[in-house]
Image (tube, rainbow, N blue to C red):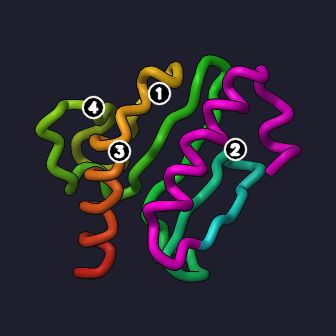
Amino acid sequence: MAALLSEYPPAAQQLTLHVRKLLLRVIPDVHEHVYPGWRIISFRMGDGHEHQICWLAPQRFGVNLGFEHGAELPDPNRVLTGNPKSARNVHIRSAKDVDVAKIVALVATAIELHRDR
């Protein structure tokens, strides 16, 4: 993970690590996997890609929290961006954009969708 993060400015690294810490705390039995080619950190509830709950994609100016089945997630707070038919993201540009309650709610819903599959 250090190699992946080293490609980004320090502020983006710190923000990515901040959101990562939250995800590690709220996803039960979490498995983390770094995909250097895709430049993401995957968070799963099992070993295979099919168990992915979400991912973090560091950016030059922040980090994106992505959901592969984001189109299936309710978004009453309208924080998700991207194609409404597939993957969706939450763009996090600074620590003040980290709304813990909203992120935890999205992750919890993604976990329930995963369990229902």
Task: Indicate the amino acid at tag 3.
Answer: Ile
Q: Nearer the viewer's eye, disc 2 or disc 1? A: 1
Query: Residue pushed farthest left?
Result: 76
Query: Is label 3 in contact with label 4 (beta carbons under 8 Å)?
Result: no
Please say if 110 is above or below 104: below
State the mark number for residue 11: none
Q: Which residue is mark 2?
A: 39
The residue beneath circle 3 is 103
Q: Which residue has dot 4 on it?
A: 79
> Considering the numbered disc 2 on the image, is that residue within a helix, a strand or a loop?
loop
Looking at the image, which residue is at 50% across and 55% down?
Answer: 23
Q: Quadrant of residue 84?
A: top left
Q: What's the magenta region?
A: 1-30
Q: CA distance from mark 3 to mark 4?
A: 9 Å
Tell me which numbered mark, 2 or 1, is placed earlier along the sequence.
2
The local crowd at label 3, few if under 14, some if 14 to 19, many if 20 or more residues have their Cα within 10 Å, is: some
Identify the amino acid type marked 2. Answer: Arg
Write down the quadrant of residue 58 in the picture.
Answer: top right
